[in-house]
Amino acid sequence: MSVFPHTQLLFEASLTVVISGPHIQILDSRTGDLITTTADRQGADKEPLLKSGPVRLAAIDKSATHLVTSGDDKQLKLWQIDGLKLLNERELPKRPTALAFTRDGQTILAADKFGDIFSYELNPAPQTVEQKKALASHDNPSGGKLILGHASFLTAFLLTSDEKFIVTADRDEHIRVSWYPQGYTIEIYCLGHEKFVSAIHIPEFAPTELVSGGGDPMLKIWDWMTGKVKREIPILHAVEPFIKVKPARRTSRRFEDDGEDGGEDSTKKSRKAKARAKRARGEDKEGSAPADEPEAAEAAEAGDPVLALRRIDSLKSDMDDTRYLIFSAVGATALFWCSYSEDAAPDIHAFDFNKPVTDFTITSDGLIWVWIDGHWSETDASGSTSSMVRVLRLSADKLVEVPADSSPLLSSLNSKCLLPATPAELKALELYLPLSALPKNNDSEHDPMDREPLENAADQISKKELGRLKSKKAVAKVQSTRPAGEEEPSEERRSKRAKSEHDEDAGEGLTDVVMEGVS
């Protein structure tokens, strides 16, 4: 029988929050006993959980009093951990990419795929009828406070320890340091990445330094107050041999437009989304998708290996105060570590689990809890399911595994906390989504200047977009055949053309984020 892999573990001294598919479980951290779970809910309490699909994001406050989650339905749900009582839920403007509580636990921060970060009060004030009507068709339906905006979807953010600054990273290689909560005031940019940035970290033992990584073949260590790179750590040579999962040749639905623009196309998307939700809940016969939907087909042939860092963390040895960086990569079967020193190229070490590492966290006692995709098999055949969670500790400059029977909590995570799942539900988890969603589509299949013939794309793009692609191709042809010495269009003409194209895009609802006070 298939079971859900754990997609997120949140550890506190007295309890542990376990996210598995659409369900939440609360365990006693000392005994491993199950305290409460959403998996045993029935009827009217169960339907909303399944309708939301898998829990994509979750965060817990410092006091372990509240939990915030979000799924594919763009609902920000606030839970009281004691009894897993749903306190409130609010609609987000766009699908979120990261969630966090502020230090006092009174504010929730949500980053989204349109590059914005909104803040929400823990307990929102009741809205009047007039306020509800005013927000009914608004692009900020729950009245969140806009903190800042990027022109590309945000992949990660963090608050500095004093919460005076917020550091944000996006898909377009940018890292920005802004004031908090006055996010419109930009302190500095940390520029130098050539590919997407998917993980950022400020070590507790080096609060003036920022470690970043993503699709580039190295980690970068910055002085984040000046925006200067202090040193780089090459990692690709050590990580690439362990990347066993390759991206499918298609863009995930989770990062497509949400269909807010209306019209026939969005209606079709809505119908398809409902059908996909049914499949994720296992309501289709035999768990299969309708044959007439393209999404129902098997995944396309996998592409080349992609480096996409999942998480970066740090650890200091209790023995000799040696400092280490710990990091993981999407689709890689190993956890990686290196010394955090002034050396330009420290050795990169790997602990291979032979199954893809989906995420990890370091607890206050220095243990490294790693969750695994235990179902994965390199041959794609149904193989044996391994442990979903394993634990490492640092010993004499090496990571060694903690015995499986050494912790009641670890035993529970690998036994009684495993919940049954259908093949459709497992597929809906999209554990390796960043491999296809984060890299930019630079191949000819996605390059409008190289696509031949353009007419074949008519089913995927609108007539207006098709016309624009044809125009771009014609311009490229003219430019390539322009005689040597012939002058290019004047700067004024190019400016007018750019403005015209910008206005046309704006008419389609695809506008850049513009922040007041930011040049």
Image (cartoon, rainbow, N blue to C red):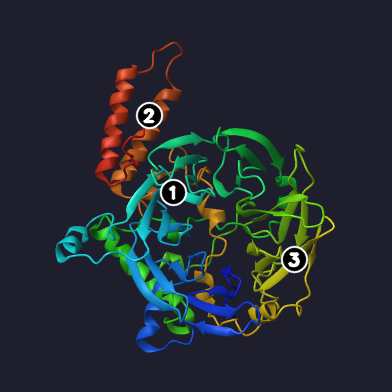
Q: Mark 2 highlights which residue?
A: 475
Name the kind of residue labelled 3 in the image: Leu
Q: Mark 1 highlights which residue?
A: 153
Task: Please provide percent x and percent y for residue 441.
Answer: 50, 46
Secondary structure at numbered mark 3: strand
Mark pair 1, 3: CA separation: 33 Å
Q: Are marks 3 and 2 in contact (CB under 8 Å)?
A: no
In the picture, which quadrant includes the C terminus? top left
Q: Are marks 1 and 3 in contact (CB under 8 Å)?
A: no
In primary-sequence order, the first of circles 1 and 2 is 1
Taking the spot 18% from the left edge, 61% from the top edge, the residue there is 131
Q: Of all residues shown, which one is farthest toward the left?
A: 130
Q: Nearer the viewer, residue 98 or 434?
A: 98
Task: Please provide percent x and percent y for residue 512.
Answer: 34, 41
Mark pair 3, 2: CA separation: 57 Å
- Foreground mark, 1 or 2, reads 1
In primary-sequence order, the first of circles 1 and 3 is 1
Question: Which image quadrant for residue 343?
Answer: top right
- Foreground mark, 3 or 2, reads 3
Name the kind of residue labelled 2 in the image: Val
Taking the spot 50% from the left edge, 82% from the top edge, the residue there is 37
Left or right? Give the position of 204 relative to 59. Answer: right
Taking the spot 30% from the left edge, 27% from the top edge, the residue there is 497
Q: Are marks 1 and 2 in contact (CB under 8 Å)?
A: no
Mark 2 crowd level (few <14, some 14–19, many ≥20, 10 Å Cα): few
